[in-house]
Image (cartoon, helix red, strand yellow):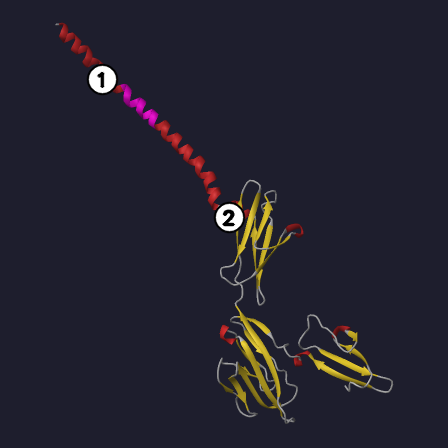
Amino acid sequence: MDSSAQANFKWKGPDGFSHVGDSVHITNPETKDLYFCTATNEVSEETAEFKLTDCPGQGSEKFATGSTQTLSVNAERALKFIEWKHKGNLVVEWYGEGDPTQYRYNAKLNTNTGDLTFKMLKVNSGEYKCQYQYKDKGTFDEKVFQVEVIDPVSKPKVTCKKNATDITLTCTIGSSVPAEFTWTGPNGFSHVGNIVHITSQETNNSLYFCTAQNEVSKETAEFTLMNCYKGGNKGPTFLYWLIPLISIFILILAVIAKRCYSKGAIPTNSNQEPDVIESVQLNGL
């Protein structure tokens, strides 16, 4: 409004939102939300509406690789021209009649709304610009979107190590995708990070959940402590059993060897004694 006019400003928005002042800060905005600003003085009152979709930068989006997504123009009236570009290169265009002309990405254009739908790949990151024109308007409107395509996280894998005092659970994903890890468990247990230490006093059937997430995806794996006792710690547990088994096996071999030696030695000595006696008798003759 005219800067020389004195006025009071009030805002209204979704979910009972209200604010007094000429500027307002909105947290966690929904792009389809509609806000109203009313300027009043002693003799007049005027109201303007504003859609967050018309705010520069609101089109910025992060998408998962391989997902099919839509960049929304949300045109309100009949259109006679639509043109989409990615980094200055034509993606699709339409001149009000017939089918749109496609140039790349096998993108689908909604000629009623101007929305563009296509499968997101890494090459699709960057700036998208849509120019469109209403049938009842001589000038062009424009919307700009900043798109970032990010690999989603894979399903986590939980491994464990056990010692005399505690159990260590480690949560990993099978890729180099950056991720944040959080844990939840019994009795309100929670932890941030991919490694958690649990006292061995926990019951074997306790269930823990590891969640890996980034800006575009979230995956969760569950782990029962019983699995750690059954084989989650295969190295040390195997040794605990192997050493006693080897000792028993060696003891059995020693007993068998001793018995075999005893049985074989006695007959050998008894067979030699008559030969010795006979030799003595012959010498005497």
The circle on residue 238 is none
Q: Which residues are drawn in magenta? A: 257-266
Q: Residue at x 31, y 26 (%)?
A: 260
Q: Residue furthest top?
A: 285
Residue 123 spot, x, y in % from top left: 49, 75
Disc 1 vs disc 2: which is toward the camera? 2
User: Secondary structure beneath disc 2?
Assistant: helix
Residue behind mark 2:
232
Q: Give the dominant element type of the magenta stretch: helix, strand or loop.
A: helix
Quadrant housing residue 257: top left
Residue behind mark 1:
271
Quadrant housing the C terminus: top left
Give how far apart the Cα atoms at labels 1 and 2 are.
61 Å
Going by the numbered disc 1, the residue's amino acid type is Asn
Going by the numbered disc 2, the residue's amino acid type is Gly
Residue 224 spot, x, y in % from top left: 57, 50
Disc 2 crowd, CA 10 A, few/some/many (<14, 14-19, 20+): some
Image vertical order of residue 37 relative to residue 207, above or below: below
